[in-house]
Amino acid sequence: MHHLVIDRWSRGSSPLHQRDPRAKLAALLVFLIALSTTPPAAQAAFVAYAILLIVAANLARLPIRGLAGRAALVLPFSATFALLTWWSGDSLRALGLAEKSFLSGMAALLLVGTTPLTGWTAALESWHAPRMLILVIQFVYRYLFVIAEQAQRMRWAALSRRGSRKRSRRVSFQFSAAAGLVGVLFARSWQRADGIYHAMLARGFRGRFVPAAPPPFQTSDALFFSACLAGCLAIRLLL
Amino acid sequence: MHIPDGFLSTPVWGTLDLVSAPAVAWVARRAQRDTQDHRIPLLGVMGAFVFAAQMINFPVGPGTSGHLVGGALLAIVLGPAAASLVMVAILALQALIFQDGGVLALGANVFNMALAGVAAGYLPYRLWEGASRSGAIFAAGAFSVITSACLALGQLMISGVPMAGGVLWASLALFLASALMEGAITVAAVRAIERLNPAWIGGPRPASSRALAAVAMTALVMVVVGTLVASAAPDGIQRLTEQGLAADWSQRTVGGVAGLGLIVALCYLGGKLISRRRSA
Protein backbone atom coordinates (compact mmCIF):
# COMPACT_ATOMS: atom_id res chain seq x y z
CA MET A 1 0.00 0.00 0.00
CA HIS A 2 1.50 3.29 -1.01
CA HIS A 3 1.03 6.64 0.49
CA LEU A 4 -2.39 8.01 -0.19
CA VAL A 5 -2.93 9.92 -3.44
CA ILE A 6 -4.91 12.54 -1.53
CA ASP A 7 -1.83 13.33 0.55
CA ARG A 8 0.10 14.07 -2.62
CA TRP A 9 -2.73 16.16 -4.06
CA SER A 10 -3.04 18.19 -0.88
CA ARG A 11 0.56 19.38 -1.09
CA GLY A 12 0.02 21.31 -4.35
CA SER A 13 0.39 25.07 -4.69
CA SER A 14 -2.64 26.19 -6.71
CA PRO A 15 -4.73 29.23 -5.77
CA LEU A 16 -7.21 26.86 -4.14
CA HIS A 17 -4.48 25.18 -2.07
CA GLN A 18 -3.45 28.57 -0.70
CA ARG A 19 -6.88 29.51 0.63
CA ASP A 20 -7.45 29.39 4.36
CA PRO A 21 -8.79 25.96 5.43
CA ARG A 22 -11.57 27.68 7.37
CA ALA A 23 -12.82 29.35 4.18
CA LYS A 24 -12.71 26.04 2.29
CA LEU A 25 -14.47 24.10 5.05
CA ALA A 26 -17.21 26.74 5.27
CA ALA A 27 -17.56 26.71 1.48
CA LEU A 28 -17.87 22.91 1.53
CA LEU A 29 -20.67 23.10 4.10
CA VAL A 30 -22.53 25.76 2.08
CA PHE A 31 -22.21 23.66 -1.06
CA LEU A 32 -23.38 20.48 0.67
CA ILE A 33 -26.37 22.17 2.27
CA ALA A 34 -27.41 23.75 -1.03
CA LEU A 35 -27.00 20.42 -2.80
CA SER A 36 -28.84 18.45 -0.14
CA THR A 37 -31.88 20.77 -0.18
CA THR A 38 -32.17 20.86 -3.98
CA PRO A 39 -35.32 19.03 -5.09
CA PRO A 40 -34.66 16.13 -7.48
CA ALA A 41 -36.83 17.75 -10.14
CA ALA A 42 -34.29 20.56 -10.61
CA GLN A 43 -31.96 18.55 -12.86
CA ALA A 44 -30.44 21.71 -14.34
CA ALA A 45 -29.18 22.62 -10.87
CA PHE A 46 -27.27 19.35 -10.60
CA VAL A 47 -25.53 20.06 -13.88
CA ALA A 48 -24.62 23.51 -12.57
CA TYR A 49 -23.23 22.04 -9.33
CA ALA A 50 -21.13 19.62 -11.37
CA ILE A 51 -19.79 22.50 -13.48
CA LEU A 52 -18.94 24.42 -10.30
CA LEU A 53 -16.96 21.43 -9.03
CA ILE A 54 -15.16 20.96 -12.35
CA VAL A 55 -14.15 24.64 -12.39
CA ALA A 56 -12.86 24.30 -8.82
CA ALA A 57 -10.94 21.12 -9.68
CA ASN A 58 -9.34 22.90 -12.64
CA LEU A 59 -8.43 25.82 -10.41
CA ALA A 60 -6.85 23.36 -7.99
CA ARG A 61 -5.06 21.53 -10.86
CA LEU A 62 -6.43 18.20 -9.68
CA PRO A 63 -7.21 15.40 -12.18
CA ILE A 64 -10.97 15.33 -12.77
CA ARG A 65 -10.93 11.64 -13.62
CA GLY A 66 -9.05 10.74 -10.45
CA LEU A 67 -11.50 12.78 -8.38
CA ALA A 68 -14.52 11.20 -10.05
CA GLY A 69 -13.07 7.73 -9.65
CA ARG A 70 -12.59 8.20 -5.94
CA ALA A 71 -16.00 9.81 -5.50
CA ALA A 72 -17.49 6.79 -7.28
CA LEU A 73 -16.69 4.79 -4.13
CA VAL A 74 -20.08 5.96 -2.79
CA LEU A 75 -21.90 4.49 -5.78
CA PRO A 76 -22.27 0.86 -4.65
CA PHE A 77 -24.27 2.03 -1.63
CA SER A 78 -26.22 4.80 -3.33
CA ALA A 79 -26.84 2.83 -6.53
CA THR A 80 -28.44 0.05 -4.47
CA PHE A 81 -30.85 2.46 -2.85
CA ALA A 82 -31.35 4.36 -6.08
CA LEU A 83 -32.34 1.09 -7.76
CA LEU A 84 -34.81 0.36 -4.96
CA THR A 85 -36.30 3.82 -5.34
CA TRP A 86 -36.49 3.44 -9.10
CA TRP A 87 -38.13 0.08 -8.62
CA SER A 88 -40.81 1.59 -6.45
CA GLY A 89 -41.64 3.94 -9.32
CA ASP A 90 -39.85 7.18 -8.45
CA SER A 91 -37.17 7.36 -11.13
CA LEU A 92 -36.48 11.10 -10.74
CA ARG A 93 -35.82 10.72 -7.02
CA ALA A 94 -33.62 7.70 -7.71
CA LEU A 95 -31.50 9.77 -10.08
CA GLY A 96 -31.36 12.54 -7.48
CA LEU A 97 -30.07 10.18 -4.77
CA ALA A 98 -27.21 8.93 -6.93
CA GLU A 99 -26.32 12.45 -8.15
CA LYS A 100 -26.41 14.00 -4.69
CA SER A 101 -24.20 11.36 -3.06
CA PHE A 102 -21.70 11.44 -5.94
CA LEU A 103 -21.43 15.25 -6.07
CA SER A 104 -21.15 15.42 -2.27
CA GLY A 105 -18.27 12.96 -2.42
CA MET A 106 -16.56 15.04 -5.12
CA ALA A 107 -16.90 18.20 -3.02
CA ALA A 108 -15.45 16.56 0.09
CA LEU A 109 -12.55 15.25 -2.02
CA LEU A 110 -11.89 18.74 -3.33
CA LEU A 111 -11.48 19.93 0.26
CA VAL A 112 -9.10 17.18 1.35
CA GLY A 113 -7.35 17.24 -2.05
CA THR A 114 -6.40 20.88 -1.54
CA THR A 115 -5.96 20.96 2.24
CA PRO A 116 -3.50 18.84 4.23
CA LEU A 117 -4.90 17.05 7.27
CA THR A 118 -3.21 19.49 9.65
CA GLY A 119 -4.96 22.32 7.80
CA TRP A 120 -8.52 21.12 8.16
CA THR A 121 -8.02 19.84 11.69
CA ALA A 122 -6.65 23.29 12.63
CA ALA A 123 -9.77 24.82 11.07
CA LEU A 124 -11.98 22.49 13.10
CA GLU A 125 -10.06 23.39 16.20
CA SER A 126 -10.47 27.11 15.62
CA TRP A 127 -14.21 26.38 15.56
CA HIS A 128 -13.86 24.85 19.02
CA ALA A 129 -13.99 21.19 18.12
CA PRO A 130 -12.73 19.25 21.16
CA ARG A 131 -8.93 19.24 21.32
CA MET A 132 -8.93 15.57 22.31
CA LEU A 133 -10.91 14.63 19.18
CA ILE A 134 -8.48 16.54 16.95
CA LEU A 135 -5.55 14.72 18.56
CA VAL A 136 -7.16 11.33 18.03
CA ILE A 137 -7.97 12.15 14.38
CA GLN A 138 -4.34 13.13 13.80
CA PHE A 139 -2.99 10.01 15.50
CA VAL A 140 -5.37 7.70 13.64
CA TYR A 141 -4.41 9.23 10.31
CA ARG A 142 -0.71 9.18 11.12
CA TYR A 143 -0.68 5.45 11.99
CA LEU A 144 -3.44 4.25 9.67
CA PHE A 145 -1.12 3.22 6.86
CA VAL A 146 1.63 1.95 9.15
CA ILE A 147 -0.71 -0.51 10.83
CA ALA A 148 -2.65 -1.36 7.68
CA GLU A 149 0.65 -2.31 6.00
CA GLN A 150 1.49 -4.47 8.97
CA ALA A 151 -1.91 -6.17 8.73
CA GLN A 152 -1.38 -6.73 5.01
CA ARG A 153 2.03 -8.34 5.60
CA MET A 154 0.63 -10.55 8.33
CA ARG A 155 -2.22 -11.63 6.09
CA TRP A 156 0.15 -12.59 3.28
CA ALA A 157 2.38 -14.43 5.70
CA ALA A 158 -0.58 -16.35 7.10
CA LEU A 159 -1.80 -17.20 3.60
CA SER A 160 1.60 -18.53 2.55
CA ARG A 161 1.97 -20.51 5.79
CA ARG A 162 -1.42 -22.12 5.34
CA GLY A 163 -0.96 -25.59 3.91
CA SER A 164 -3.41 -27.49 1.79
CA ARG A 165 -3.98 -30.17 4.42
CA LYS A 166 -7.55 -30.95 5.23
CA ARG A 167 -7.34 -29.56 8.75
CA SER A 168 -6.27 -26.14 7.56
CA ARG A 169 -9.19 -25.94 5.14
CA ARG A 170 -11.78 -26.31 7.86
CA VAL A 171 -13.72 -23.11 8.44
CA SER A 172 -13.35 -23.32 12.21
CA PHE A 173 -9.58 -23.60 11.87
CA GLN A 174 -9.38 -20.62 9.54
CA PHE A 175 -11.67 -18.67 11.82
CA SER A 176 -9.45 -19.13 14.85
CA ALA A 177 -6.38 -18.41 12.71
CA ALA A 178 -7.93 -15.08 11.71
CA ALA A 179 -8.69 -14.36 15.37
CA GLY A 180 -5.03 -15.05 16.15
CA LEU A 181 -4.00 -12.53 13.48
CA VAL A 182 -6.26 -9.90 15.02
CA GLY A 183 -4.78 -10.67 18.44
CA VAL A 184 -1.20 -10.28 17.24
CA LEU A 185 -2.06 -7.13 15.33
CA PHE A 186 -3.59 -5.75 18.52
CA ALA A 187 -0.47 -6.64 20.51
CA ARG A 188 1.82 -4.95 17.99
CA SER A 189 -0.39 -1.85 17.87
CA TRP A 190 -0.35 -1.65 21.66
CA GLN A 191 3.42 -1.90 21.78
CA ARG A 192 3.72 0.69 19.04
CA ALA A 193 1.57 3.09 21.06
CA ASP A 194 3.95 2.66 24.00
CA GLY A 195 6.88 3.33 21.72
CA ILE A 196 5.22 6.47 20.39
CA TYR A 197 4.69 7.79 23.89
CA HIS A 198 8.33 7.20 24.81
CA ALA A 199 9.41 8.98 21.63
CA MET A 200 7.15 11.90 22.56
CA LEU A 201 8.74 12.07 26.02
CA ALA A 202 12.20 11.96 24.45
CA ARG A 203 11.26 14.97 22.32
CA GLY A 204 10.27 16.96 25.35
CA PHE A 205 6.53 16.27 25.67
CA ARG A 206 5.40 17.77 28.99
CA GLY A 207 1.85 16.47 29.19
CA ARG A 208 0.13 18.97 26.95
CA PHE A 209 0.09 19.81 23.29
CA VAL A 210 0.64 23.37 22.15
CA PRO A 211 -1.41 24.12 19.05
CA ALA A 212 0.22 26.25 16.36
CA ALA A 213 -1.35 29.68 15.88
CA PRO A 214 -3.58 29.66 12.78
CA PRO A 215 -2.48 31.91 9.88
CA PRO A 216 -4.48 35.14 9.47
CA PHE A 217 -7.73 35.02 7.52
CA GLN A 218 -7.03 37.19 4.47
CA THR A 219 -9.22 39.24 2.18
CA SER A 220 -8.70 36.71 -0.62
CA ASP A 221 -10.07 33.97 1.67
CA ALA A 222 -13.16 36.05 2.39
CA LEU A 223 -13.57 36.71 -1.34
CA PHE A 224 -13.24 33.00 -2.11
CA PHE A 225 -15.91 32.10 0.43
CA SER A 226 -18.23 34.85 -0.82
CA ALA A 227 -17.84 33.63 -4.40
CA CYS A 228 -18.69 30.06 -3.35
CA LEU A 229 -21.66 31.26 -1.31
CA ALA A 230 -22.95 33.38 -4.18
CA GLY A 231 -22.50 30.55 -6.69
CA CYS A 232 -24.31 27.99 -4.54
CA LEU A 233 -27.14 30.38 -3.66
CA ALA A 234 -27.58 31.37 -7.29
CA ILE A 235 -27.82 27.74 -8.42
CA ARG A 236 -30.10 26.77 -5.56
CA LEU A 237 -32.51 29.69 -5.92
CA LEU A 238 -32.50 30.36 -9.67
CA LEU A 239 -32.41 26.91 -11.29
CA MET B 1 -23.79 1.08 7.33
CA HIS B 2 -22.38 4.51 6.53
CA ILE B 3 -25.08 6.84 5.22
CA PRO B 4 -23.82 9.10 2.38
CA ASP B 5 -24.99 12.67 1.83
CA GLY B 6 -28.18 13.14 -0.14
CA PHE B 7 -30.09 10.28 1.47
CA LEU B 8 -31.36 11.85 4.68
CA SER B 9 -33.98 14.58 4.57
CA THR B 10 -32.94 17.95 5.98
CA PRO B 11 -34.86 17.63 9.30
CA VAL B 12 -33.26 14.24 9.91
CA TRP B 13 -29.62 15.14 9.30
CA GLY B 14 -30.07 18.56 10.85
CA THR B 15 -31.49 17.14 14.07
CA LEU B 16 -28.86 14.42 14.31
CA ASP B 17 -26.03 16.91 13.71
CA LEU B 18 -27.47 19.11 16.45
CA VAL B 19 -27.75 16.13 18.81
CA SER B 20 -24.36 14.63 18.03
CA ALA B 21 -22.24 17.80 18.31
CA PRO B 22 -22.80 18.42 22.05
CA ALA B 23 -22.74 14.65 22.70
CA VAL B 24 -19.30 14.41 21.10
CA ALA B 25 -18.10 17.38 23.14
CA TRP B 26 -19.29 15.63 26.30
CA VAL B 27 -17.68 12.33 25.29
CA ALA B 28 -14.42 14.14 24.51
CA ARG B 29 -14.41 15.80 27.92
CA ARG B 30 -15.02 12.48 29.67
CA ALA B 31 -12.37 10.72 27.60
CA GLN B 32 -9.87 13.47 28.40
CA ARG B 33 -10.64 13.15 32.10
CA ASP B 34 -10.30 9.36 32.13
CA THR B 35 -7.24 9.09 29.90
CA GLN B 36 -3.77 9.42 31.35
CA ASP B 37 -1.07 11.08 29.26
CA HIS B 38 0.57 7.88 28.20
CA ARG B 39 -2.68 6.55 26.76
CA ILE B 40 -3.29 9.43 24.35
CA PRO B 41 -1.27 7.83 21.53
CA LEU B 42 -3.00 4.55 22.36
CA LEU B 43 -6.41 5.96 21.42
CA GLY B 44 -5.14 6.96 17.99
CA VAL B 45 -3.28 3.74 17.39
CA MET B 46 -6.35 1.72 18.40
CA GLY B 47 -8.36 3.66 15.80
CA ALA B 48 -5.78 2.73 13.18
CA PHE B 49 -5.86 -0.85 14.48
CA VAL B 50 -9.63 -1.08 13.91
CA PHE B 51 -9.19 0.24 10.37
CA ALA B 52 -6.48 -2.35 9.69
CA ALA B 53 -8.20 -5.25 11.45
CA GLN B 54 -11.08 -4.83 9.01
CA MET B 55 -8.75 -6.12 6.30
CA ILE B 56 -8.52 -9.53 7.98
CA ASN B 57 -11.19 -11.89 6.68
CA PHE B 58 -13.01 -14.31 8.92
CA PRO B 59 -14.44 -17.21 6.90
CA VAL B 60 -17.93 -18.09 8.09
CA GLY B 61 -19.21 -20.48 5.47
CA PRO B 62 -18.70 -21.58 1.89
CA GLY B 63 -17.56 -18.52 0.00
CA THR B 64 -18.67 -15.98 2.58
CA SER B 65 -16.51 -14.12 5.02
CA GLY B 66 -16.95 -11.26 7.43
CA HIS B 67 -14.67 -8.88 9.21
CA LEU B 68 -14.47 -7.20 12.56
CA VAL B 69 -16.49 -3.98 12.84
CA GLY B 70 -14.82 -3.12 16.11
CA GLY B 71 -17.19 -0.87 18.06
CA ALA B 72 -17.73 -3.42 20.83
CA LEU B 73 -14.05 -4.42 20.94
CA LEU B 74 -13.01 -0.78 21.35
CA ALA B 75 -15.60 -0.28 24.09
CA ILE B 76 -14.34 -3.33 25.97
CA VAL B 77 -10.67 -2.35 25.65
CA LEU B 78 -10.80 1.43 26.08
CA GLY B 79 -14.01 2.04 28.02
CA PRO B 80 -17.10 3.71 26.53
CA ALA B 81 -16.06 7.38 26.37
CA ALA B 82 -12.65 6.81 24.78
CA ALA B 83 -14.10 4.20 22.42
CA SER B 84 -16.80 6.65 21.27
CA LEU B 85 -14.20 9.32 20.66
CA VAL B 86 -12.03 6.96 18.61
CA MET B 87 -15.08 5.95 16.56
CA VAL B 88 -15.91 9.63 15.92
CA ALA B 89 -12.35 10.15 14.66
CA ILE B 90 -12.61 7.10 12.40
CA LEU B 91 -15.98 8.24 11.01
CA ALA B 92 -14.69 11.76 10.35
CA LEU B 93 -11.71 10.39 8.43
CA GLN B 94 -13.91 7.96 6.52
CA ALA B 95 -16.34 10.72 5.55
CA LEU B 96 -13.72 13.17 4.33
CA ILE B 97 -10.95 10.99 2.95
CA PHE B 98 -12.44 7.60 2.10
CA GLN B 99 -15.86 8.74 0.84
CA ASP B 100 -17.48 6.34 3.27
CA GLY B 101 -20.43 8.22 4.70
CA GLY B 102 -21.40 11.84 4.08
CA VAL B 103 -20.19 15.05 5.71
CA LEU B 104 -23.64 16.42 6.51
CA ALA B 105 -24.69 12.88 7.45
CA LEU B 106 -21.71 12.66 9.82
CA GLY B 107 -23.98 13.55 12.74
CA ALA B 108 -26.26 10.64 11.86
CA ASN B 109 -23.37 8.22 11.39
CA VAL B 110 -21.75 9.39 14.63
CA PHE B 111 -25.04 8.92 16.45
CA ASN B 112 -25.60 5.43 15.02
CA MET B 113 -22.11 4.01 15.28
CA ALA B 114 -20.00 6.07 17.67
CA LEU B 115 -22.62 6.94 20.30
CA ALA B 116 -25.42 4.35 20.17
CA GLY B 117 -23.25 1.62 18.63
CA VAL B 118 -20.48 1.91 21.22
CA ALA B 119 -22.99 2.19 24.07
CA ALA B 120 -24.77 -0.89 22.74
CA GLY B 121 -21.42 -2.65 22.65
CA TYR B 122 -20.48 -1.63 26.16
CA LEU B 123 -23.68 -2.08 28.15
CA PRO B 124 -24.24 -5.83 27.59
CA TYR B 125 -20.59 -6.45 28.44
CA ARG B 126 -20.87 -4.45 31.65
CA LEU B 127 -24.22 -5.96 32.64
CA TRP B 128 -23.61 -9.64 31.95
CA GLU B 129 -19.84 -9.95 32.28
CA GLY B 130 -20.28 -11.55 35.70
CA ALA B 131 -22.77 -14.15 34.49
CA SER B 132 -21.06 -15.42 31.37
CA ARG B 133 -18.03 -13.67 29.98
CA SER B 134 -18.17 -15.12 26.48
CA GLY B 135 -21.91 -14.60 26.33
CA ALA B 136 -21.53 -10.98 27.38
CA ILE B 137 -18.85 -10.30 24.77
CA PHE B 138 -20.94 -12.02 22.09
CA ALA B 139 -23.98 -9.95 23.04
CA ALA B 140 -21.83 -6.81 22.99
CA GLY B 141 -20.67 -7.39 19.43
CA ALA B 142 -24.06 -8.47 18.13
CA PHE B 143 -26.04 -5.75 19.87
CA SER B 144 -23.63 -3.04 18.75
CA VAL B 145 -23.99 -3.94 15.07
CA ILE B 146 -27.74 -4.48 15.11
CA THR B 147 -28.29 -1.16 16.93
CA SER B 148 -26.28 0.87 14.41
CA ALA B 149 -27.85 -0.88 11.44
CA CYS B 150 -31.44 -0.56 12.66
CA LEU B 151 -30.98 3.12 13.51
CA ALA B 152 -29.53 3.81 10.05
CA LEU B 153 -32.37 1.91 8.40
CA GLY B 154 -34.96 3.78 10.44
CA GLN B 155 -33.41 7.14 9.59
CA LEU B 156 -33.39 6.30 5.89
CA MET B 157 -37.03 5.29 6.05
CA ILE B 158 -38.06 8.40 7.99
CA SER B 159 -36.29 10.40 5.27
CA GLY B 160 -38.56 8.78 2.71
CA VAL B 161 -36.18 6.35 1.03
CA PRO B 162 -38.70 3.72 -0.02
CA MET B 163 -38.26 0.17 1.25
CA ALA B 164 -40.56 -2.33 -0.36
CA GLY B 165 -41.66 -5.07 2.04
CA GLY B 166 -39.28 -7.73 0.79
CA VAL B 167 -36.30 -5.39 0.87
CA LEU B 168 -37.01 -4.37 4.44
CA TRP B 169 -37.15 -7.96 5.66
CA ALA B 170 -34.10 -8.90 3.61
CA SER B 171 -32.08 -6.10 5.15
CA LEU B 172 -33.24 -7.00 8.65
CA ALA B 173 -32.19 -10.62 8.02
CA LEU B 174 -28.85 -9.39 6.67
CA PHE B 175 -28.36 -7.21 9.77
CA LEU B 176 -29.11 -10.14 12.04
CA ALA B 177 -26.61 -12.32 10.20
CA SER B 178 -23.87 -9.70 10.38
CA ALA B 179 -24.68 -9.03 14.04
CA LEU B 180 -24.23 -12.70 14.92
CA MET B 181 -21.01 -12.72 12.91
CA GLU B 182 -19.69 -9.66 14.73
CA GLY B 183 -20.53 -11.31 18.04
CA ALA B 184 -18.59 -14.44 17.15
CA ILE B 185 -15.63 -12.46 15.75
CA THR B 186 -15.50 -10.19 18.82
CA VAL B 187 -15.42 -13.19 21.16
CA ALA B 188 -12.65 -14.85 19.12
CA ALA B 189 -10.63 -11.62 18.93
CA VAL B 190 -10.96 -10.88 22.66
CA ARG B 191 -9.93 -14.44 23.49
CA ALA B 192 -6.89 -14.17 21.19
CA ILE B 193 -5.86 -10.85 22.75
CA GLU B 194 -6.31 -12.20 26.27
CA ARG B 195 -4.09 -15.16 25.48
CA LEU B 196 -1.28 -12.73 24.65
CA ASN B 197 -1.75 -10.46 27.65
CA PRO B 198 -4.82 -10.53 29.91
CA ALA B 199 -4.05 -7.03 31.20
CA TRP B 200 -5.00 -5.45 27.86
CA ILE B 201 -8.66 -6.36 28.16
CA GLY B 202 -10.68 -4.83 30.92
CA GLY B 203 -9.57 -1.26 30.64
CA PRO B 204 -10.48 1.39 33.17
CA ARG B 205 -13.31 0.40 35.52
CA PRO B 206 -15.93 3.13 35.72
CA ALA B 207 -17.55 3.97 39.01
CA SER B 208 -21.13 4.09 37.72
CA SER B 209 -23.57 1.51 39.02
CA ARG B 210 -25.03 -1.50 37.29
CA ALA B 211 -28.54 -0.15 37.79
CA LEU B 212 -27.62 2.90 35.72
CA ALA B 213 -26.23 0.62 33.03
CA ALA B 214 -29.46 -1.38 33.03
CA VAL B 215 -31.53 1.80 32.67
CA ALA B 216 -29.28 2.99 29.85
CA MET B 217 -29.59 -0.37 28.13
CA THR B 218 -33.39 -0.28 28.33
CA ALA B 219 -33.40 3.26 26.98
CA LEU B 220 -31.18 2.23 24.08
CA VAL B 221 -33.40 -0.72 23.17
CA MET B 222 -36.42 1.58 23.26
CA VAL B 223 -34.71 4.12 21.00
CA VAL B 224 -33.86 1.45 18.44
CA VAL B 225 -37.28 -0.18 18.48
CA GLY B 226 -38.97 3.21 18.53
CA THR B 227 -37.02 4.44 15.51
CA LEU B 228 -37.95 1.36 13.53
CA VAL B 229 -41.59 1.43 14.53
CA ALA B 230 -41.89 5.17 13.92
CA SER B 231 -40.29 4.89 10.51
CA ALA B 232 -42.49 1.97 9.52
CA ALA B 233 -45.65 3.46 11.02
CA PRO B 234 -47.04 5.71 8.27
CA ASP B 235 -47.87 2.90 5.91
CA GLY B 236 -46.44 -0.34 7.24
CA ILE B 237 -48.65 -0.86 10.25
CA GLN B 238 -51.75 0.40 8.48
CA ARG B 239 -51.23 -2.03 5.68
CA LEU B 240 -50.59 -4.90 8.06
CA THR B 241 -53.85 -4.34 9.92
CA GLU B 242 -55.77 -3.90 6.69
CA GLN B 243 -54.57 -7.01 4.95
CA GLY B 244 -54.31 -9.41 7.86
CA LEU B 245 -50.99 -9.99 9.52
CA ALA B 246 -50.12 -13.59 8.79
CA ALA B 247 -50.48 -13.83 5.03
CA ASP B 248 -48.68 -10.58 4.48
CA TRP B 249 -45.88 -11.44 6.85
CA SER B 250 -45.16 -14.83 5.33
CA GLN B 251 -45.20 -13.34 1.84
CA ARG B 252 -42.73 -10.68 2.84
CA THR B 253 -40.50 -13.15 4.60
CA VAL B 254 -40.35 -15.43 1.60
CA GLY B 255 -39.60 -12.46 -0.64
CA GLY B 256 -36.95 -11.24 1.75
CA VAL B 257 -35.21 -14.57 2.12
CA ALA B 258 -35.28 -15.14 -1.62
CA GLY B 259 -33.75 -11.71 -2.21
CA LEU B 260 -31.11 -12.39 0.42
CA GLY B 261 -30.26 -15.73 -1.20
CA LEU B 262 -29.91 -14.02 -4.56
CA ILE B 263 -27.56 -11.39 -3.11
CA VAL B 264 -25.42 -14.03 -1.39
CA ALA B 265 -25.23 -16.08 -4.59
CA LEU B 266 -24.21 -13.04 -6.63
CA CYS B 267 -21.54 -12.06 -4.10
CA TYR B 268 -20.24 -15.63 -4.06
CA LEU B 269 -19.97 -15.78 -7.85
CA GLY B 270 -18.37 -12.33 -7.99
CA GLY B 271 -15.85 -13.34 -5.34
CA LYS B 272 -14.96 -16.51 -7.23
CA LEU B 273 -14.50 -14.56 -10.43
CA ILE B 274 -12.27 -11.96 -8.81
CA SER B 275 -10.13 -14.49 -6.97
CA ARG B 276 -9.69 -16.50 -10.17
CA ARG B 277 -8.63 -13.39 -12.05
CA ARG B 278 -6.22 -12.42 -9.25
CA SER B 279 -4.52 -15.79 -9.20
CA ALA B 280 -4.35 -16.00 -13.00
Image: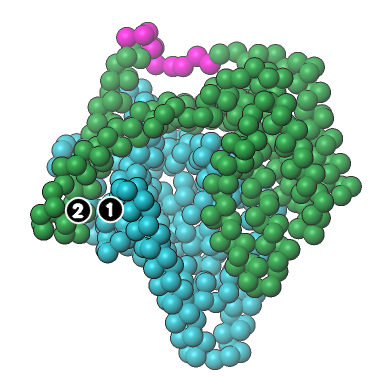
Chain colours: A green, B cyan
Residue A28 falls in image quadrant:
top right
| Image location of residue A64, percent across then percent down | 65, 35
Q: Is the magenta stretch mostly helix, strand or loop?
A: loop
| Residue at the image point whose x is 40% and y is 56% from the top | B145
Which portion, as a residue range, is magenta?
A202-211
Query: Helix or strand or loop: what does disc 2 sit on?
Result: helix
Horizontal side, residue B132 vs residue A119: left or right: left
Could you tell me which residue is drawn at 13 percent across and 48 percent down?
A163
Q: Residue furthest front?
A: B280
**Dot 2 surroundings within 10 Å: few (below 14), some, or many (20 or more)?**
some
* CB-based contact (under 8 Å), mark 1 and mark 2: yes
**For this view, does A62 lie left or right of residue B145?**
right
Q: Is residue A205 magenta?
A: yes
Answer with left or right where residue B181 lies relative to residue A95: left
Whether residue B220 is visible, yes or no, is no
Give the class, few, some or many, for how many residues have Cα within 10 Å of label 1's Cα (few <14, many ≥20). many
Q: Where is residue A101 drawn, in percent x and y?
A: 64, 50
The residue that disc 1 covers is B58
What percent of the width, then of the height, locates residue B84?
Answer: 44, 42
Q: Residue A174 carries which label?
A: 2
Answer with left or right where residue B208 lies relative to residue A94: left
Subunit under mark 1: B
Q: Where is residue A116 in the image (x, y as percent from the top left)?
A: 56, 23
In the rendered structure, does residue B84 fall within the stretch colored magenta?
Answer: no
Q: Residue at x 54, y 55 (%)?
A: A77
Q: Residue furthest right?
A: A238
* Residue drawn where x is 48% and y is 80% of the image: B255
Would you place residue B89 above or below residue B145 in this image?
above
